[in-house]
Amino acid sequence: MSRAGKAAAAFGLVLALPLAARAWRGAVDSGDTAWILTSTALVLFMTLPGLALFYGGLVRAKNVLSVLMQCFAITGVVSVWWLLYGYSLSFGSDLGGVVGGLDKALFAGVGVDAVSGTIPETVFALFQLTFAIITPGLVLGAFAERMKFSAVLWFTVLWATLVYAPVTHWVWGGGWLGQMGLLDFAGGTVVHVTAGAAALVSALVIGKRRGFPDTPMPPHNMTLTVAGAGMLWVGWYGFNAGSALAADGGAGMALVATHLSASAGALTWMACEWKKYGKPSVLGVVTGMVAGLGTITPASGFVGPAGALVIGIAAGLVCFNATNYVKQVLGIDDSLDVFPVHGVGGMLGTLLAGVLCSPALGPLSGLGFADGIGSIGRQVGVQAVGVGATFGYTVVVTFVILKAIDAVCGLRVDEETEIQGLDLVLHEERGYDL
Amino acid sequence: MSRAGKAAAAFGLVLALPLAARAWRGAVDSGDTAWILTSTALVLFMTLPGLALFYGGLVRAKNVLSVLMQCFAITGVVSVWWLLYGYSLSFGSDLGGVVGGLDKALFAGVGVDAVSGTIPETVFALFQLTFAIITPGLVLGAFAERMKFSAVLWFTVLWATLVYAPVTHWVWGGGWLGQMGLLDFAGGTVVHVTAGAAALVSALVIGKRRGFPDTPMPPHNMTLTVAGAGMLWVGWYGFNAGSALAADGGAGMALVATHLSASAGALTWMACEWKKYGKPSVLGVVTGMVAGLGTITPASGFVGPAGALVIGIAAGLVCFNATNYVKQVLGIDDSLDVFPVHGVGGMLGTLLAGVLCSPALGPLSGLGFADGIGSIGRQVGVQAVGVGATFGYTVVVTFVILKAIDAVCGLRVDEETEIQGLDLVLHEERGYDL
Amino acid sequence: MSRAGKAAAAFGLVLALPLAARAWRGAVDSGDTAWILTSTALVLFMTLPGLALFYGGLVRAKNVLSVLMQCFAITGVVSVWWLLYGYSLSFGSDLGGVVGGLDKALFAGVGVDAVSGTIPETVFALFQLTFAIITPGLVLGAFAERMKFSAVLWFTVLWATLVYAPVTHWVWGGGWLGQMGLLDFAGGTVVHVTAGAAALVSALVIGKRRGFPDTPMPPHNMTLTVAGAGMLWVGWYGFNAGSALAADGGAGMALVATHLSASAGALTWMACEWKKYGKPSVLGVVTGMVAGLGTITPASGFVGPAGALVIGIAAGLVCFNATNYVKQVLGIDDSLDVFPVHGVGGMLGTLLAGVLCSPALGPLSGLGFADGIGSIGRQVGVQAVGVGATFGYTVVVTFVILKAIDAVCGLRVDEETEIQGLDLVLHEERGYDL
Amino acid sequence: MKLVIAIVKPFKLDEVRDALAEIGVQGLTVTEVKGYGRQKGHKEHYRGAEYVVDFRPKVRLDVAVAADRVPAVIDAICRAARTGKIGDGKIFVTNLEEVVRIRTAETGPEAL
Amino acid sequence: MKLVIAIVKPFKLDEVRDALAEIGVQGLTVTEVKGYGRQKGHKEHYRGAEYVVDFRPKVRLDVAVAADRVPAVIDAICRAARTGKIGDGKIFVTNLEEVVRIRTAETGPEAL
Amino acid sequence: MKLVIAIVKPFKLDEVRDALAEIGVQGLTVTEVKGYGRQKGHKEHYRGAEYVVDFRPKVRLDVAVAADRVPAVIDAICRAARTGKIGDGKIFVTNLEEVVRIRTAETGPEAL
Ligand SMILES: Nc1ncnc2c1ncn2[C@@H]1O[C@H](COP(=O)(O)OP(=O)(O)O)[C@@H](O)[C@H]1O
Ligand SMILES: Nc1ncnc2c1ncn2[C@@H]1O[C@H](COP(=O)(O)OP(=O)(O)O)[C@@H](O)[C@H]1O
Ligand SMILES: Nc1ncnc2c1ncn2[C@@H]1O[C@H](COP(=O)(O)OP(=O)(O)O)[C@@H](O)[C@H]1O
């Protein structure tokens, strides 16, 4: 059963039988709980310090702290928002398939004894929170090195409320996409398509960095980036295998799929660079790895090892070319390539999940379609609806949010600040004094 | 049941029925064990490399290795000490409520089949060891950049023996504070008050760094500090949620409290800086996060989500002002602000735990008082005794230890060494050769 | 029961009763599974970013990315190889005690419901993969700063196939060494002896770095190295305690042994440096820690706490002197000291495991000999055969592999590349632009 | 021959280099330096400790040229490096008694 | 005008800067350099490999001043930078033929 | 006295330092610089963005010597630093009007 199914079932029962909640205690499995506690730590680790270092190393030295600052501040803001009403909007009782109600605001009912499936609901809520944190975290790669810090904070709250929470509800919270049978094991649509679409819109609305693309803007510290990449890989074990919400064979197979796709993505990107530029780079390898991970995310609990290999290879090929296309042909300054890696990867993976979940593909077979769906065609159709709806909705709402913030308090720092660097001007600090 | 209770109960039985130990094997819960094994890794991770990087980034480049060296050496020394007699002093059979006996020296009786609660006693002993490691590790922030390395080693052994072990016994090992009903879930008194008090005394006894406060001594590598901060946050999941000694709803709620307090602490410190200095800094955000984590530590298993939020906000406000006060008004060179962050946070959190554990505070309700205590007033009284006794005892004994070391072999490096940097002079190494 | 025994038993049954596999589901223990999922993450973490940073910091700035690149590429290549046929060669049905058959190629039979012991076989397979990744990763320290990237890739595939897989089968996959009663809990022979022997041969075949030993080649960034060292320590909890393949007292005792040996190794190396050179260094402390960890690895599940202390001290003493001997007396440029630390440590630990496993050594007693072995003499004899066979076999095959690669496509970069640095010439990137 | 030493703002480096290349200067040497002058420094804040950093990052260019090229070089640098704001930097000119190209041991103007 | 080049110990930088400011020097440029001289270097140890590093960290100050200010400048630097221990550094004086302020194109002493 | 400024390839630094020590030069100051000249730079690739970095890492040596030692110094540097490939670097010589040893206030040649 997918996460959506498990969660919905558990919530349904909790809602139906609130008084019986205490009696549920026996339903908590300590092994499953241990694994989801661990997975929660792993997914937080992906953002702090994983993503922070990954992104921080890629910008210029004068802006490194601004990126680290944004990662920490987003974590703080989203966490408090989650307690206040974010969790409830996402996983509260379903309002017409569109959004959750406010019945779980302030974690109402999420006590020590509340249970979700075989784990405490507190653990479920925190595990989900770590996904809500990393998603806007991913977006910041698009507008790095030029967005006002205050604008980042406003953007985080509004975007989490208006984009992240509803889409999560659609897919995992009992909403219309989950009901329709969308397969998204760990966040292909919820995390990667939303982040990628928002990144694309952000890059276009805020505009290019001063000097792009003529001035070289190489990463200032690739050791940070590679360290962060390693942390992302490790943390992704929790992201995908934790999304099984249990420590069982399903988690094990998700782990296999995740690891193989990351490997295949890394090697494929490396091969593409070697062929096209004559030399493979470590930034290429780790980007391919992230592409492989992002792309397997929706599919990880539904495909087999060979299917995962196919997805990883596809991720490398498609995201490599998408990155070049966006930068060289379209000339868009999505500074840290969020859209071509996460957005494109998330869409690709969600669609491929619909194919490779099929149990009738011989060695490429997966673990089966969504309940009530019987063919690749129908499953892919549902997947396409999921991708399209998520992408379209995110693009429109993100655009409105950014324009509103720009009108009210301005999105972009002034030229002098951009030249001097955000670290000194916005935060009165410097990254290094060696 | 609190950790103290669980541990004491388990030990009582083990002591009463030594011959029956093998029969206990059935009592080991693999899920709980998995989570405490994981938590042990997480708490070690807090020190190595977490705290090492956090502190290492804050000193000047010429002293970075001395800090990393001290973190590793303390880990080694405390670990061997724990095996020899540290564990036994802390958790051996109670001697008058004051200290443990030597019956567990050399891990006597801690065999493959020994059980503590629902986990193997080996796992309990190692989990506790990681706390014993980080506590003197925290203290070194106070005397960074000027203490002799040999003096650090002596200090570690003496302080662990004379301060850490007895206080641990008082609170968690069956000693008088635990018996009195002190609520300290994961080390507000045991870890943070002792470390903070020792830091304050150390800073005063060893004196200011040459040039303080006129010469700028900015952090030499904030990316290390932020990386370490992220590791601390992640590792603290094991510190607090692991202190439930089980993978259950209690661990889940401790996780929720921990995470929210960290978030609220970070945001509050950020707001304070923004208001007072006009700009928020990433060092401020991560310091607020650590303050939030230190402050929730004693309370994490006893309060609810809203209570944790209150504690995080209080941590940010109080520790921010304490830091400024110690540095600007008192002019004390507690170099990495250990006392105002950990000491003040630990005291604040221990007191607030006494209030917010109350089950009768509406949305701010916690999970209940200690056994046999019936009102906030009485609980806070006990908490105050715990804070006062721990602080007073630590101050006196730390002072004596430092003076003794100074008399015998000297605490502080000479001026030439301080100017050249500890890395080259004491360790014949340099941090960077870029 | 050792890992070899557990695994063999499980596989035997799986092979005998393939149709009953689904019925096995009940045999999966969620707590054990949670711990091995976590351990898998921990061991991957040892390589990425642990080992990558540890090694990366030790080379010169111009070659840092080449090391990070090799770590990532090796991870990718070995992972895909494991799926294709590596896992099967190692753990497929036994062919004459020498190698596994191809029945598990492409993870055939390793479905969602396949079980190995008390955990899903997917989890077992991934856990084992992380060992297969780090072993060739360790070797690269020997030829760092001068090997062609393409040669590294070829070497990885050939060496994993011809050395790692068969030796793994001998010891853990049901092969002749396991049958003979070799005690190797977590890879003293499989990982450390093979890596060390291969390192020695590599250093000799590829030759010294230009300028060695006259030109100073100090580590370019010790903070990376120390960060990586901390990650290695934490990750090794999964390496050794995870090798219990369960979350039980055996895992707990392995954790104790691992931690104490690391501590003792670090302190011993520190003492040796202090005595010999007058000053202890942080590189010395972390190297001693790694030596302690490598040496306890084969013994970790078989010895008690005091035995682990002895092993750690022996590791520090022996590996310290071995390092000086190889570098100063033999003049071999094993650039990052892989042989004297891992090779010598692995041999030492495997032999000492044969002594200290004895249950009749008073406080130094361990947990018993291998099934059917009754005395220290006989156990040490078996251990010596294991060490000798592994070392000898690895030396010969590694030599042949390297000579073959050299003949076909060349092992070493040209002088100009070595002077300019591998990062720019092979990967068109620079580590830092501060 | 003269050695023209220019201290300019770092983000102007590429423009200055291009301007010099345009007038035929074939070589120069760049050093990262910190400047102290009329242009105010910046503040840094760390946990309540406030530091005023008076030094600003600058780059120094050393350009050896034949004496008659000096006015053109100064002119090119000024045009490319000027923002009109305080802190644009200085140009210093000293005399060069000898120039040697190490590779060929050529000396004098042809070594440039 | 003259260019006064001083090589001093890094931890003396702030004192020298202050001493120069006191006598009215309004600008200077600082470079991190490594010095080799009578002052002995240091040893470094890495896993049994011993390296002798002969170079010591120093800072170089370049101060352009009117010719008549040179003695005062030298005096200020000497007083502030002296520790009396070997390795205190050197001062070199060269002639400056021209000075230009980039922002205003002023030349000569008023450009300083 | 003269100031000899040499720009050489970084990996030649130790050899040049030794060559100078052999002919009795007792002190020098080293700066890490970036050179731009006939020697081509390198390309860097980051996710499809290609940057041509024209600057090459070099080191600059400043050696103050008595005027009569200049030819010997130039000769020593040239021999030690030459690889024969483009980019070996340059030597510039300027006049030094004064030298002061900060520690002792000695001036002139004995301050060297
Ligand atoms: N007298 C001087 N000697 C050496 N360098 C100087 C001198 N005055 C200024 N500089 C350099 O020129 C830079 C710019 O000078 P400043 O006074 O800030 O502005 P401006 O160039 O507009 O007059 C300084 O940062 C410093 O590097
Ligand atoms: N001949 C020289 N040319 C250039 N720089 C020199 C020369 N001699 C010394 N220096 C610089 O001055 C610094 C101090 O010189 P040193 O001989 O160590 O001590 P002292 O200044 O006390 O004589 C050196 O580190 C070097 O940077
Ligand atoms: N006119 C110049 N002024 C200052 N430095 C120069 C000049 N020409 C060359 N250089 C320095 O000398 C280095 C080598 O010069 P280049 O033209 O590449 O080769 P070569 O020395 O063989 O002629 C350059 O990288 C630069 O640092």
Image (cartoon, coloured by chain):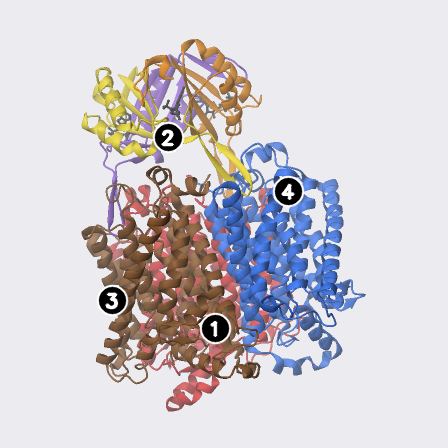
Chain colours: A blue, B red, C brown, D orange, E purple, F yellow
Q: Are marks 1 and 3 on the same chain?
A: yes
Q: Which residue is mark 2?
A: F58
The answer to whether residue C149 is left or right of residue C34 is left
Residue B381 sits above or below residue B204 on the image: below
* Image location (x, y in percent) of residue C266: 30, 61
Instruction: Classify mark 1 as within 8 Å of ligand 3 or not, answering yes or no.
Output: no
Q: Is residue B411 above or below residue E64?
A: below
Q: Nearer the viewer, residue C189 or B229?
A: C189
Give the mark toward the camera: 2 or 1. Answer: 1
Q: Is mark 2 within 8 Å of ligand 3?
A: yes
Do tags 2 and 4 sit on the same chain?
A: no
Which residue is tagged 4? A326
Which amino acid type is shown beneath numbered disc 3? Ala
Q: Are marks 2 and 1 on the same chain?
A: no
Residue corresponding to mark 1: C103
Badge 1 or badge 3: first in the primary sequence: 1
Residue at horizontal 52 percent and vertical 20 percent from the top: D19
Q: Chain of mark 2?
A: F
| Residue located beneath label 3 in the image | C314
10 Å neighbourhood of mark 4: few (<14), some, or many (≥20)? some
Residue C199 at least partly seen = yes
Q: Amino acid at mark 2?
A: Lys
